[in-house]
Image (cartoon, helix red, strand yellow):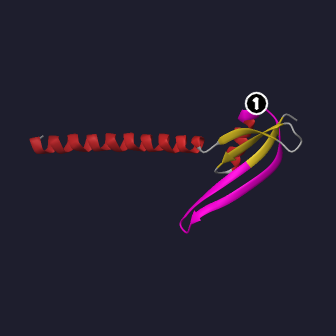
Amino acid sequence: MTSFATNLTSKNQVGKKLISHLSFLSLAVLSLAVVACQTSQPITGPDGTEHQLIGCSAIEYCYQKATAVCAGPYKIINTNSEVSGSEGSTYTTVKLLVKCGK
């Protein structure tokens, strides 16, 4: 193989590895973004007992967070969703008020 061909093959392999690493990094960042968008905050509910206010970008993530925060069953007290942004770039915020336990 000529020096030019060897150098070209080596650069091609480096490029493939770089793309592979960037793809993995992008997936990791996206996963963290999804997890980071889930929040929970203890608040006093309408009946005077402790409830959890869960915030997330999609209702299924709120359900997952509520199950984790409550370590089991919970009762949904109220839900709310809001879409914000402008044309072509919108973001949904979902709030779920839950009471842990049955």
Q: Residues within 10 Å of mark 1 (few under 14, many from 20)?
A: few
Q: Amino acid at mark 1?
A: Ala
Say which residue label 1 marks.
Answer: 71
- Name the residue located 61 percent from the left edge and 61 percent from the top edge: 84
Q: Residue 94 magenta-drawn?
A: yes
Between 71 and 79, which is closer to the camera in this rendering?
79
Q: Is residue 53 visible?
A: yes
Q: Measured from the top left, where is residue 52 in percent x and y?
A: 76, 39
Between 21 and 80, which is closer to the camera in this rendering?
80
Q: Measured from the top left, where is residue 14 in percent x and y?
A: 27, 40
- Name the residue located 68 percent from the left edge and 46 percent from the top edge: 55
Q: Residue 70 magenta-drawn?
A: yes
Q: Measured from the top left, where is residue 11 in percent x and y?
A: 22, 43
Q: Which residues are magenta?
A: 68-95
Image check: 9 left or right of 85? Answer: left
Q: Main secondary structure of the magenta part?
A: strand
Label 1 residue SS: loop
Q: 71 above or below 28?
A: above
| The furthest residue to the bottom | 87
| Quarter of the rendering occupied by the N terminus | top left
Q: Is residue 2 visible?
A: no
